[in-house]
Image (tube, grey):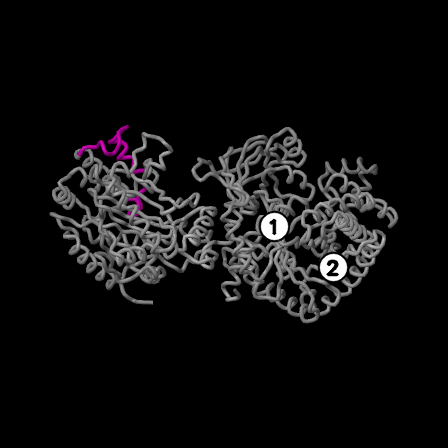
Amino acid sequence: MSDQSIWFFGNGTADGDGAMKELLGGKGAGLAEMSRLGLPVPPGFTIPTTACTAFFEGENILPSDLLEAVSQGMARVGELTGKRFGDSDNPLLVSVRSGAPISMPGMMDTVLNLGLNDETVVGLGESSGDPRFAWDAYRRFMQMFGSVVLGVQYSRLARELDRVRGEREEADLTVEELQLVVERLKGVIDSAGKTFPEDVNEQLRLAIEAVFLSFNTARARFYRKSRGISDDTGTAVNVQAMVFGNTGETSATGVAFTRNPKSGEAALFGEWLPNAQGEDVVAGTHTPLPLYSAQTGADPSLATLEATLPEAFAHLEKLQKQLELHFRDMQDIEFTIERGQLYLLQTRTGKRTPGAAVQIVVDLVNEGIITVEEALGRIDAGMLEMVLRPVLDPDAPRKVLAKGLDASPGAASGRVVFHAEDAQEMVSRGEKVVLVRNETSPEDIQGMTAAEGILTARGGQTSHAAVVARSMGKPCVVGCNDIVVDYARQLFYAGDTVVRRGDFITLDGASGTVMEGQVPMLLPPTESGSMHQLLVWADERARLTVRANADNAHDASRARSLGATGIGLCRTEHMFFRPDALRAMRQMILAEDSRSRTRALAQVLPLQRDSFAEIFRAMDGLPVTIRLLDPPLHEFLPTREEDVEAVAADLGIRAGALRHRLEALEESNPMLGHRGCRIGITTPEIYATQVRAIMEAACLVASEGAEVLPEIMIPLVAIDKELSICREQAIATAEKVLEEQGQAIDFKVGTMIEVPRAALTAYKVAEHADFFSFGTNDLTQLTYGFSRDDMGKFLPGYLKARVLEDSPLSVFDQEGVGELVKIAAEAGKAKNANLKVGVCGEHGGDPKGVRFFHAQPVDYVSCSPFRVPVARLAAAQAALSVGDV
């Protein structure tokens, strides 16, 4: 990388170009490229990102050679503008703005009108012929420099302006009043123990340092962390000659997007303000106006740039088309009009909503501007999930109460309830509710089903609440340590706010935010034409296929509509939590002998059969992998004291007897206890009942003319003998059903690889399996020795100390768990050439995980229905990155 101190741009030339974002930052690279194109860009220079790194390494001091280069750069800018920095007759003013390689809008600092002091303000007034403009610029500079560079609280500075203007607009202030404001601003700065420098070179040095320092503010660090941006990029600093949009009625400032950033519509979109500077638009302190008539919404009171300054607008239209064609993407342009002359101050790839992003790349392909491969590469696969879920209206006001973990995307509003039965009761009356719990358990499943969204004070992104919410497609915020739940009084505290049962709240599952009241939402279509086209292109280029995790026919149908090629995981335990099935299940668990257990299971069989049949119908012609019972039996029994009494009465037994049974079933570590295939071996009638239900459902649906492809999955195998026993029992039951029904249905029996031993001995396990499916959630926990229910106690400290960069339950651990997947997949395929290998943990919908699985002998990934499009695109991107297309 070059050690050049500054990179000049302007007057149709530039030292750098648009490809140098890493060195010049996004803004600097854009300014250089626009200058090379001969566009009207005020001259200036960029201090590269390497100088930022050197600044922090040098104890936050600008080196003397850089300051000398800056001085030379200022002289060159002065020559091109006919002005001189610090000159009392015709002063050169500059802006000092940040520009990181990856855009961080609003996160770092800017200083405008730099170069004014008590002498140069007079010269600016005389050279411009407008003393009022000069003093207004001085007032603006004083406020911005005082807060950004000197660290004086902005509200203290703004208060002085408000005191002088009263109820009037800033434009109504006279020269004398503006001079008074400046004097008062100096007084505020002095009273804060700061000194406003009259030396313009000192102003420039301090401003450059302030921009560098703003790269490491808490807000900038948080922004980078939340978006996965490295802290090592640094920021460039752009020093550029000022042009002024606040010099009268023929001057203006604004922002324009070459396409609508909200919808993706191929039409110019933006806002402007007459007689103003750029900060007035972006700071939100003024209400801007639409650029042209189509944006006004037929409101004649809104003055457009098109009508007010038609020549400048026509020039802007022409240049924005040129820029989009040159950069081959939607551009975000900042512009200023000074006395009728248009200047471009920035162009960068514009931020856009997920839906707009899809629409834009598809349109660009159809317009012949980019290739299909480029379109697929430009979309962040993870954001596709957001296109399909309700989202908050970005323009709607909101009051944030708390912040948790973004467990399941989408937005939801409803009345607060704290118990599942309350959720059901209120929903039955037509109310919408949000279920708030410390954490959820299987007992809450009905309340979770009824609720619009779920909020928990504890738990992580693979907690019960998170996993179930994602499978349901419900917005969910978990691990919200900002709230304190009080079940007894049916309320929760969020700071100083008390939220009671029945109060409305809104959840944003994409950001983990909890808001007061009902925040308006946007309801995107479930499948747009542009989304469909993008994913068709993705499927044509992917090697991995994508299945879905779905436990009912509704989710299965939804997954199929989103392009799933089958069901990779159907969890049968969720079916047992239906009230009628749960009662029979509890009778079975409490039974004293096999005959009693079988009699209780006979009540469960038709319920499961009906559920399986509905799923088979929804997935006609596609494989359906059904996992036999996995969780320990005690999870089906009540845990809350009030529930123990009710369940005992319902089952006709003494509460004491039930408590005794609960104590007998209690396990020290249920994750490592009596669950999965261990239940199938010790209580074979449970698995036999489930297999019978699967095969009877398959025969029923096949008799209706559908193609049924059942796959029976044995969970938690650690020893090949476990799978051998369970497989033999499953095949015997399945063949008996087929004989009874007189049908021939091709079925498979395989296992979920979620225990490290099974992965390491996969060459043995594969002898008894038609397929492997990696349950990466449990495989990760068992590899690390972590429990997802307890990780919250130490994970924040691990992340802060950078022991871990991310939770391994959220971002797939390629180094450790990935090695087990690789070993097992390769060994399994070597032993059994016909072995199908898939991934059904939540990592199957994570783009980073998909990229890793693509490189292994894995045939498919499976994920929550709403993540199917994510995985489809990620699979194509993985294939493109290694040249498999």
Circle 1 is placed at which residue position?
864
Q: Is residue 508 left or right of residue 349?
A: right
From the top left corner, tell me how far across and down residue 701 is, in percent. Answer: 75, 48
From the top left corner, tell me how far across and down residue 865 is, in percent. Answer: 60, 49
Q: Residue 336's image quarter?
A: top left
Tell me the amino acid under the disc marked 1.
Ser
Q: Can residue 685 be seen by looking at this rendering? A: yes
From the top left corner, tell me how far across and down residue 131 is, in percent. Answer: 15, 39
Q: Measuring 59% from the left and 33% from the top, which residue is drawn there?
A: 432
Marks 1 & 2, CB-CB < 8 Å contact: no
Position of 698 relative to 659 (above/below): below
Which portion, as a residue range, is magenta?
A: 145-174
Q: Is residue 702 left or right of residue 457?
A: right
Which of the pair 281/374 is nearer the observer? 374
Dot 2: what SS? strand
From the top left corner, tell me how far across and down residue 463 is, in percent. Answer: 62, 49
What crowding class fits label 1: few (fewer than 14 Cα within 10 Å), some (14-19), or many (20 or more)?
many
Work out how far the residue at label 1 is from the one at label 2, CA to CA, in angstroms.
22 Å
What crowding class fits label 2: few (fewer than 14 Cα within 10 Å), some (14-19), or many (20 or more)?
some
Q: Is residue 692 left or right of residue 305?
A: right
Q: Nearer the viewer, mark 1 or mark 2?
A: 2
Position of 864 relative to 823 (above/below): above
Which of the pair 197/310 is nearer the observer? 310
Asked if residue 495 is among those painted magenta in the image, a careful observer would answer no
Q: Measuring 36% from the left and 47% from the top, which residue is drawn there?
A: 258
Q: Name, please, the residue furthest toward the front.
A: 705
Precedes in sequence: disc 1 or disc 2: 2
Q: Can residue 145 be seen by looking at this rendering? A: no
Instruction: Give the dominant element type of the magenta stretch: helix, strand or loop.
Output: helix
- Please state, as top left, top right, bottom left or bottom right, where the N terminus lies in the image: bottom left
Circle 2 is placed at which residue position?
748
